[in-house]
Amino acid sequence: MRGRKACRKCKYIVDSKVSVCPVCGSRDFTSRWMGFIIVIDDSTRLKDLMNLEKEGMYAIRIL
Ligand SMILES: [Zn+2]
């Protein structure tokens, strides 16, 4: 997962070139995060459970 960073606010994982989080609009990113989950379109229950808005990759833990 080199070259990826995670939004500190919503934990969404983006490419290091991205400057604004596509989920929450935050510009606060960190390259120090651990583990990730992939949320796909039909995992509505997981989205509800974790309060996620958009499919994609999310960090489990921000260091
Ligand atoms: Zn975000």
Image (cartoon, helix red, strand yellow):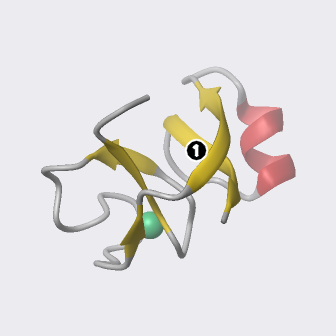
Q: Is residue 63 above or below residue 55?
A: below
Image spot of residue 7 (x, y percent): 45, 64
As drawn, is 61 to the left or to the right of 53?
A: right
Say which amino acid is labelled 1. Answer: Tyr
- Which residue is depicted at the point 54% across and 75% down? 9
- Which residue is depicted at the point 30% across and 58% down? 22
Quadrant in which residue 38 is drawn: top right
Quadrant position of the C terminus in the picture? bottom right
- Which residue is depicted at the point 23% across and 49% down? 16
Q: Quadrant of ligand 1?
A: bottom left
**Number of numbered tags placed on the structure image:** 1
Disc 1: which residue: 58
Q: Is mark 1 within 8 Å of ligand 1?
A: no
Q: Is residue 58 above or below residue 50?
A: above
Depth check, front residue: 49 or 61: 61
As drawn, is 40 to the left or to the right of 23?
A: right
Within 10 Å of disc 1 (Cα), the crowding (few <14, some 14-19, many 20+) is many
Q: Is residue 49 above or below residue 63?
A: above
- Which residue is depicted at the point 52% across and 58% down? 32
Depth check, front residue: 19 or 22: 19
Quadrant in which residue 47 is drawn: top right
Q: Secondary structure at mark 1?
A: strand
Image spot of residue 41 (x, y percent): 55, 24
Quadrant position of the N terminus in the picture? top left
